Image (cartoon, grey):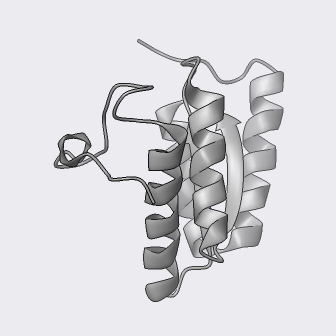
Amino acid sequence: MPELPAEIFKAYDIRGVVGKTLTPPVVRSIGQALGSLALDRGRDTIVVARDGRLSGPELCRALAEGIQSSGTNVIDIGAVTTPMSYFAADEGAQNPDRGREAQDRLRQLSARGCLRRVS
């Protein structure tokens, strides 16, 4: 297990420099810890999402691998807006099947151009 840099842990999130403080092994370890916490709290599924940054696919994959290594299921909803990830996470927390339904519905809406980022 890699040493986790203390400076990446902020009050409400995890932030770092990709390739330096945030690497796939670090993110995988964080995923394993999150998956273990979820199981300890009676949850067996975590929804993961990412934004449009180029590092997103690799880091999201590492996060999912870490979560799954703990025995926790992962629903990966891909690149979505923050409100979409909150919606899917809330639905998935209530019921994993509803989380998958939310994922499918968000993809349908996105494909039809019904969802867009508002700045």
Instruction: Please say whether residue 88 is visible from this viewpoint.
Output: no
Identity of the residue furthest to the top in this view: 119
The C terminus sits in image quarter: top left
Position of residue 35 measured from the top left corner of the image (x, y, whole percent): 52, 70
Closest to the observer, 25 or 86: 25
Name above or below for residue 42 compared with residue 31.
Answer: below
Name above or below for residue 43 compared with residue 89.
Answer: below
* Residue 59 as seen in the image, left or right of residue 100: left
Position of residue 4 measured from the top left corner of the image (x, y, whole percent): 31, 51
* Residue 110 as seen in the image, left or right of residue 54: right
Position of residue 50 measured from the top left corner of the image (x, y, whole percent): 57, 34
Instruction: Please say whether residue 116 is visible from this viewpoint.
Output: yes
What residue is at 31 percent from the left and 31 percent from the top?
Answer: 16
Question: In which quadrant of the rendered view does residue 18 lie?
Answer: top left
Closest to the observer, 44 or 32: 32
The N terminus sits in image quarter: bottom left
What residue is at 64 percent from the left and 54 percent from the top?
Answer: 64
What residue is at 63 percent from the left and 33 percent from the top?
Answer: 58
Name above or below for residue 109 compared with residue 91.
Answer: above
